Amino acid sequence: MNIIIAGDGEVGLHLAEALEHSDHNITIVDPHEELLKMMESHSDLMTIAGDSTSIKTLQKANVKKADMVIAVLHDEHINLLTGILAKKLGAKRVIARVNTMENIGQEAWRIYQDLGIDGIVSPEDIAAQEIVSLLKQTGATEAYDFAGGKLEMYMMKLDDKAYVIGKTLNEIGERFKHLDFRPVAIHRRQNTFIPHGTDTLQAGDMVYVISKPHAVKELMSMSGKQKINIHNVMIIGGGRVGRMTAKRLEKDMDIKIIESDKNRCYELTSSLSNTLVVNADARDVDMLEEEGIKSVDAFIAVTENTETNILTCLQAKAYGVKKTIALVENIDYIDISQNIGIDTIINKKLIAASYIVRYTLGDNVSTLKFLSGIDADIVEFVVPDGCLATMRPIEKLHVPEGAIIAGVIRGELSYIATDDFQIEAEDRVVVFAMPSAIKDVERLFR
């Protein structure tokens, strides 16, 4: 595919890097010449310095031959205008990043479709959805469900007292035959690998597991985790992510937002009906005590400052808060943050890239999730009739190294993938894969 990415910083850069190892021809349009020079020195990407709402700039990028134009600048109005112009100039498909809640509603979406926009993505909205999911599955550090929850993927960091420490996966599988689950990856000391039955689990391992919903509670218990009942939630930062999270939670939980900007506090009180808004600096430890941090069940730090989010989450842990979630925008900080005690990391660049890259993988890819802190993806394929994956059992499919078929959804039923399982047309197949294996995995499902 010929793909044009219009960006103004790190989101566009990360998206380009996510697509760089594919067979696509990538052109970056960005107003920052210095950033483009840096990108050119480290990659073979074509770059154009300029304004993506300029017809001349889009023509220079050969927009009339573009299979896809992706606009991910910080200003949603520029993204929408870029998409509309690109479509009028001949681009086959356009995707635009939006930020405000009014632009992700059904009415707005219908209007944008009429104007030629093929897809919209709101990293802030998806981040809020992920936070809500994590508060429901409190033992997991990362969680994601497929086909409405028929299969679940989650990551657990193993405590040193967990039952499974020192045991091989074969021993664990034999002991828990009654559970439907499959470990698909282990992240250990900055190294991610697909495990075999003889691999032994160690304290500190981050284990990625696919399971049926009924198995989650017992799997959490044997990994040293316990379900936390979440009632009181403190959110640091009343920006888009904080506001959208509060909006989704305020009917069921007691929510308190700490926001340092007074004008933003006024906006929050007018848009939220059952959330307490406090105008204060979250770095003030005395204020946190006064606002009852010791009685908080979950602490969510989503300010625009990564360092503030990390430090306040660590402070919350020191006060005994059981579940902490931090928005970490610097990808280099993710692994460090997970290892110093923060339960879950949210990153908007990964969120945006997961959503958008899915469009480049073909119509049979229904879900793509870039995982935080490791260089790996979870992909859900809808199996077409006559593809290689339906020709023989899984053990004879020659699944590429760096990938594992984890689970299958067939109608209303779900299955953990085993070697003798036979995939059928119209199944939804969940695959864990390193980026280097995605292209070869995709061939199985064409």
Image (cartoon, grey):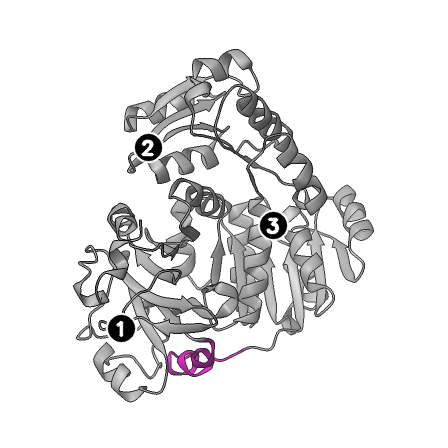
Q: Give the side of residue 116 with respect to residue 167, left or right.
A: right
Q: Are marks 3 and 1 in contact (CB under 8 Å)?
A: no
Q: Pick whichever of labels 3 and 1 is earlier in the sequence.
A: 3
Q: Amino acid at mark 3?
A: Asp
Which residue is drawn at the image coordinates 22% and 67% (left, top)?
Answer: 393
Which residue is drawn at the image coordinates 54% and 68% (left, top)?
Answer: 323
Q: Amino acid at mark 1?
A: Thr
Residue 184 visible in the shown view: yes
Give me the disc on residue 24.
2
Q: Can you give x and y, in whole percent of width and height, for residue 32 in the image?
A: 47, 21
Q: Pick whichever of labels 2 and 1 is earlier in the sequence.
A: 2
Q: Give the side of residue 265 with respect to residue 429, left or right.
A: right
Q: Which segment is the magenta one?
A: 213-227
Q: Nearer the viewer, mark 3 or mark 2?
A: 2
The quarter in which the N terminus is drawn is top left
The residue singled out by tag 1 in the image is 418
The residue singled out by tag 3 in the image is 125
Of 213 and 311, the residue lying toward us: 213
Q: Pick whichever of labels 3 and 2 is earlier in the sequence.
A: 2
Give the CA distance from mark 3 to mark 1.
35 Å
